[in-house]
């Protein structure tokens, strides 16, 4: 895609990768609107308040954005929560519900809200956001991984159903990215945010835009089964379960 001429809505873009992506699109020349529940922290870009767990909020945000930016042609949906869960304790269920409500159902809600507009335009791009964990579980956060795997599958089906409409579907699958100094201290192996965004913008700007936006750091996750490293990597990632109380 031409990253310099787009009108982009990034839902879930008030911090981290989403905000970094918004600023990169804006720096390239695109018009960018940031959506989320904490828009007060974004002072350099237009914003819209939206809670993806609330259907009324999503539709109100859609109407607001399209009234101000009828030329909208790119929707990035990346609202998400990452919650640890102890599956030996039934009390984890509330965390599972919250994760599904935000990550999976929230993604579908945003897509449903804007798909008719993009189809009517006859062109545009929907960018879903999954994770390397969609392809290689992180046992400490089981429902998070399940939602990301579901969004991967949903993205594949969405692409098939939108074929011929002019609307493309790209899936952004980040590895661990250090979006704050605290995150970098907790995981020194995480990719630095600027380095990650450098790779992402180059991939998004290529023609045609890849169906999967995969930086080098996520390849070990994406192709673990093919490469025969899956079981070993899951075992290594299971060491994080020691951080659960009583383990």
Image (spheres, rainbow, N blue to C red):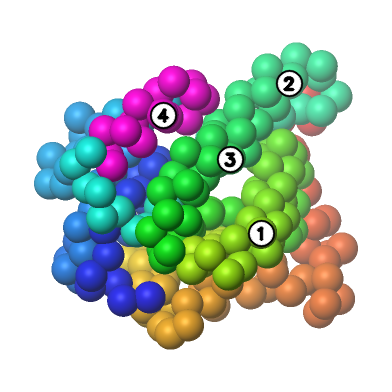
Q: Mark 4 points at which residue?
A: 59
What is the C-alpha distance between the residues marked 4 and 1?
A: 22 Å
Q: Which residue is drawn at 60% across and 28% down?
A: 101
Give the foreground label among 1 and 3.
1
- Mark earlier in primary sequence (1, 2): 2
Q: Is residue 55 magenta?
A: yes
Left or right, residue 127 beside residue 36: right
- Mark earlier in primary sequence (4, 1): 4
Q: Position of residue 137 (x, y in %)?
A: 75, 52
Q: Which picture quadrant has residue 245?
A: top right
Q: Where is residue 237 in the image (x, y as percent from the top left)?
A: 73, 53
**Which residue extends farthest left?**
44
What is the C-alpha distance between the residues marked 1 and 2?
A: 35 Å
Q: Does the magenta stretch include residue 103?
A: no
Q: Name the residue under label 1.
A: 161
Q: Name the residue under label 2.
A: 92
In the rendered structure, find residue 108 and report the number of the disc placed on it.
3
Give the foreground label among 2 and 3.
3
Q: Which of 191 and 75 is in front in this view?
A: 75
- Mark 4, secondary structure of its residue: helix
Give the foreground label among 1 and 2.
1
Circles 4 and 3 in contact, beta carbons < 8 Å: no
Chain part drawn in magenta: 52-66
Q: Where is residue 168 in the image (x, y as percent from the top left)?
A: 51, 66
């Amino acid at each position: 895609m031409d990253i310099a001429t787009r009108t982009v809505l990034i839902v879930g873009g008030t911090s981290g990768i989403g905000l970094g992506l918004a600023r990169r699109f804006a720096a390239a020349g695109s018009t960018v609107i940031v959506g989320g529940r904490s828009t007060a922290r974004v002072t350099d870009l237009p914003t819209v308040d939206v809670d993806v767990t609330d259907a009324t909020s999503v539709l109100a945000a859609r109407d607001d954005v399209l009234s101000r930016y009828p030329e909208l042609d790119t929707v990035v949906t990346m609202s998400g929560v990452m919650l640890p869960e102890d599956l030996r304790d039934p009390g984890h269920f509330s965390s599972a519900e919250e994760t599904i409500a935000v990550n999976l159902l929230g993604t579908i809600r945003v897509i449903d809200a804007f798909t008719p507009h993009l189809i009517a335009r006859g062109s545009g791009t929907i960018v879903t956001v999954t994770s390397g964990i969609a392809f290689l579980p992180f046992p400490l956060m089981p429902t998070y991984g399940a939602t990301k795997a579901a969004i991967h599958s949903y993205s594949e089906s969405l692409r098939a159903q939108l074929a011929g409409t002019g609307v493309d579907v790209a899936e952004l699958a980040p590895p661990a990215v250090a979006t704050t100094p605290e995150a970098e201290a907790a995981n020194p192996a995480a990719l630095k945010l600027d380095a990650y965004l450098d790779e992402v913008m180059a991939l998004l700007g290529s023609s045609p835009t890849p169906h999967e936006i995969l930086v080098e750091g996520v390849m070990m996750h994406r192709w673990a089964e093919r490469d025969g490293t899956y079981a070993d990597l899951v075992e290594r990632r299971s060491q994080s379960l020691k951080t659960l109380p009583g383990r």
